[in-house]
């Protein structure tokens, strides 16, 4: 079944209202790298049967105190949300989680996950928005461009 995907700039005002305008009945999936207090909005945007994938906590990176606390808090929410009988699911995905605990398991999981991502790219199920391609020799320019917030999409470095 084809799906419609609409990236939403999280830096703009009232993201949740803009998403609700696009999908009044809720969305099938939310991929949230911002985390923090906004993760609750992401959960509330889901339609019945929807899935939330949190893969970061960018909004808490400059917070004072423990860097682990926001992650533990998020994991608690994920556990609680998954216990609710509403058909929605929540996951926290961290590509680096567990690397220090079990290198073999970590590498196997990362390999399996990346194999799925690259297969989806090859099938055309995922079409990344590429805003600019620059040669590797211009890495500093690429970083400035990516951090400028002036474009939609990713900056790709080519060897």
Image: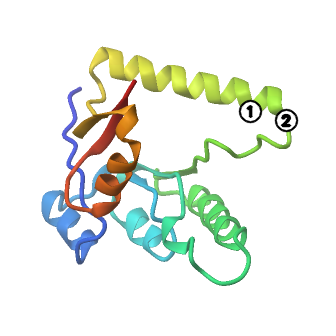
Q: Please state which of residues 69 and 53 is positioned toward the viewer in this rendering.
A: 69
Structural distance between the alpha carbons of marks 1 and 2? 6 Å
Residue 132 in view (yes/no): yes
Q: Quadrant of the N terminus?
A: top left
Q: Quadrant of residue 45?
A: bottom left
State the mark number for residue 149.
Answer: none
Residue 80 placement, left or right of 14: right
Residue at 24% from the left image edge and 77% from the top image edge: 14
Task: Point out residue 51 in the picture as x, y percentages from the top left corner.
Answer: 43, 48
Q: Residue furthest right?
A: 101
Q: Is residue 144 left or right of residue 76?
A: left
| 67 left or right of 43 in image | right
Residue placed most toward the observer, 84 or 10: 10
Image position of 59 with respect to 128: above or below: below
Q: Is residue 88 above or below residue 122?
A: below
Q: Residue at x 66, y 65 (%)?
A: 71
Image position of 71 (left or right of 44): right
Residue 79, picture quadrant: bottom right
Q: Quadrant of residue 2?
A: top left
Q: Position of residue 8 (x, y in %)?
A: 24, 58
Q: Which residue bears the numbered disc 2?
A: 102
Give the answer, above or below, for where 79 lies relative to 36: above
- The answer to which of 35 and 130 lies nearer the viewer is 130
* Element class at badge 1: helix
Q: Are marks 1 and 2 in contact (CB under 8 Å)?
A: yes
Residue 106 image label: 1
């Amino acid at each position: 079944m084809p799906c419609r995907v609409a990236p939403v700039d999280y830096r703009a005002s009232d993201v949740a209202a803009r998403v609700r305008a696009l999908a009044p009945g809720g969305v099938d999936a939310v991929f949230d790298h911002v985390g923090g207090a906004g993760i609750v909005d992401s959960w509330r945007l889901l339609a019945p049967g929807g899935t939330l994938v949190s893969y970061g906590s960018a909004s808490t990176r400059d917070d004072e105190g423990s860097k682990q606390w926001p992650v533990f808090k998020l994991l608690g929410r994920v556990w609680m949300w998954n216990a609710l009988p509403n058909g929605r699911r929540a996951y926290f995905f961290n590509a680096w989680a567990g690397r220090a605990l079990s290198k073999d398991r970590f590498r196997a999981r990362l390999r399996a996950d990346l194999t799925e991502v690259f297969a989806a790219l090859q099938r055309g199920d995922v079409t990344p928005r590429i805003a600019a391609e620059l040669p590797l020799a211009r890495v500093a320019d690429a970083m400035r461009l990516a951090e400028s917030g002036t474009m939609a999409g990713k900056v790709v470095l080519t060897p």
